[in-house]
Image (spheres, rainbow, N blue to C red):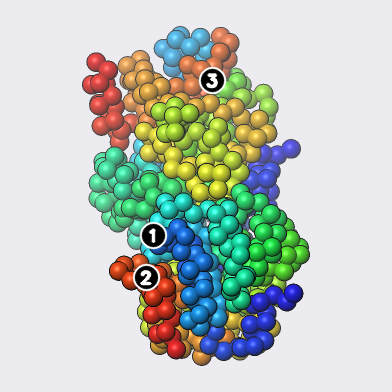
Amino acid sequence: MENRITSLFKRKDENILSIYFTAGYPELNDTVKIISQLEKSGTDLVEIGMPFSDPVADGPVIQQSSEIALRNGMTIHLLFEQLKEIRKSVSIPLILMGYLNPVMQYGIEAFCEKCKEIGIDGTIIPDLPLEIYETEYKEIFEKNTLSNIFLVTPQTSDERIKQIDSLSTGFIYMVSSSSTTGVKGAVNEEQISYFERIRKMNLRSKRLIGFGIYDKASFEKASGYANGAIIGSAFVKALEDEGTETETRVKNFVQKFY
Amino acid sequence: MSYQSDDKGYYGEFGGAFIPEMMYPNVHQLQNCYLEIIESDDFRQEFKQLLRDYAGRPSPLYYSDRLSDHYYAKIYLKREDLNHTGSHKINNTIGQILLAKQLGKTRIIAETGAGQHGVATATVCARAGLDCIVYMGALDVARQSPNVEKMKMLGAEVRPVFSGNKTLKDATNEAIRDWINNPVDTHYILGSVVGPHPYPDMVARFQSVISEEIRMQLLEKTGKETPDYVIACVGGGSNAAGAFYHFLDDPTVKLIAVEAAGKGVDSGESAATTQLGRTGVLHGSKSLLMQTPDGQIVEPYSLSAGLDYPGIGPMHANLFVTKRAQFLSATDDEALRAALYLTQKEGIIPALESAHALAALEMIEFKPDDVVVVNVSGRGDKDMEAYLSYYQSTK
């Protein structure tokens, strides 16, 4: 079967809305509920965060959601258990995002095999560098039709971007500015020239822009320079709004982007 | 077999550079240029001169009559406590500030546990006229207040960190996040032999002056360059890396690394990584780490803020698994007793971290002719509160 990320981009290659949430937050067993509602509300792609105790690439919002998720008892084993039957009801691409150490303790090969069994299409592991992926893990990921997604930043050299492009099978995750996640701000001139620079490189890979995308305006602006954009912290923050059902919060949030 | 890192920063299976792409340009630049810069004649000359005229090196190697009598061996103390700023940390910060200037960086960040590395960083930044921001766990800010005041007087901004256990690991996370957010003008002066390549090797090289001097001083005092034992405490492991460095490839020298057992290795409140840890990845390198079966990092515990870290540097992880070094551990109480003993017998108040190394003297059967060097990595001024409350409670 073709990887669902690849199929998605064949079907649609603009304004792709990708949404991140931390598994186990706000409640331990919200995972399937959130994914299903994201799909129903029109999300194109979902990134499921595997919480880690020391998320160095993340800002305060995702740090806090990770801390709560871990306190709630989330583990990779439990997450796989929750996702066991996800493909009976959900058909959009699913990506697991998290730091290397928990994946390494699970066992990288076992992890990739489990992903395939469940129907996970990709991974984002920020602290697994390109070089180590290429020499040690690429074959295992490919055997399990798992796209490992790499990040590029405004500081990434053209030469390295080309190298990342040649190793990418899903899409390239363009970090919008030099920052950890959840730093808000209007898209500025410097970012636009970076987006333009990458666009003009005519890469073979599709591109989604993430970090600092939080509302319809920033989503549309970013999507203008790539195939779509990724929303993380803003969605995680919206989930904490108490007094309504989780599904309602998800629906209300996603609706704002259409 | 060499116990030094290879050109990719690996010590056996440990080390490497497991960093998010956001850190790649800075770390890659360091990897490419650090050896060329720090091995150049100009750099070496300036570094050496500052270590001598500014930090007060060489630090004395002091023969302790009274410890020698007590432990039936020839005990020498390497007096890193006498360095400017009160510990070995100044060796590394002098090296890294010179490097940062060569790289054209204008803003310095650092993490600190006990505050010794923070003070040493703030000191070299004052001298160099560079902005300095020190991340420090909120718990450590409270338990090491004299060092916090010193950093402030030196012109550094101390940013308390409230995440996690509010100690060294969390301060390191926050320093890394700062670097991600400020990739152009900032150099991160990491204080230990941890972090992504080239930090473990670079910091070890700057600290290696300790064992370089020990060799010369022993030759002068005993007629022989090598001791039978070198003993040092290990949190991340920078003072131990420096004290072991020039003895690593000489198997006649027994290397003893002493970890903090906290309230006891099996008490659930400990920082004895080699006994409680497994291989994992944190702060950019693969090493031994205290973690849950699920790979979440466990909060360590030690009364000593400088040893309160859930990992050890990759060099030490390799020394442990290859059995090149022997790893012991000392509890809070054992360290406190050792500190009191040295203070009363020799008139030297050691840092609580260094007291762990001294506590190991109780655990080893020496032969009378054994030459033993204990690295007294720092002085105890910052620990007076902990010492006073201990002595009041034991009176």
Q: How crowded is mark 1: few (under 14 residues within 10 Å), some or many (20 or more)?
A: many
Q: Is residue A241 something one can see in this rendering?
A: yes
The amino acid pointed to by label 1 is Gln
Chain letter of the residue beneath label 1 in the structure image: A
Which element type, helix, strand or loop, lies under badge 1?
A: helix
Q: Nearer the viewer, residue B124 or A245?
A: A245
Query: Which residue lies under the disc numbered 1?
Result: A64
Residue drawn at 51 percent across, 9 percent down: B72
Residue drawn at (43%, 53%), measured in percent from left and top?
A72
Chain letter for the residue marked with disc 3 in the picture = B
Give the residue type that dot 2 points to. Answer: Glu
Which one is nearer the viewer's eye here, B41 or B386?
Answer: B386
Residue under pointer 2: A245
Instruction: Tell me residue A69's x, y (percent).
Output: 44, 57
Judging from the image, mark 2 belongs to the subunit labelled A
Upstream in sequence: badge 2 or badge 1? 1
Looking at the rendered structure, the secondary structure element under dot 3 is strand
Left or right placement of residue B289 versus residue A110 in this view: left
Q: Is residue A217 above or below residue A130?
A: below
- Marks 2 and 1, how far apart at CA: 21 Å
Three-letter residue code for mark 3 = Val
Q: How far apart are marks 2 and 3 (CA)?
A: 67 Å
Q: Name the residue under label 3.
A: B372
Name the residue furthest front: A88
Q: Is B6 on the left-hand or right-hand side of B84?
A: right
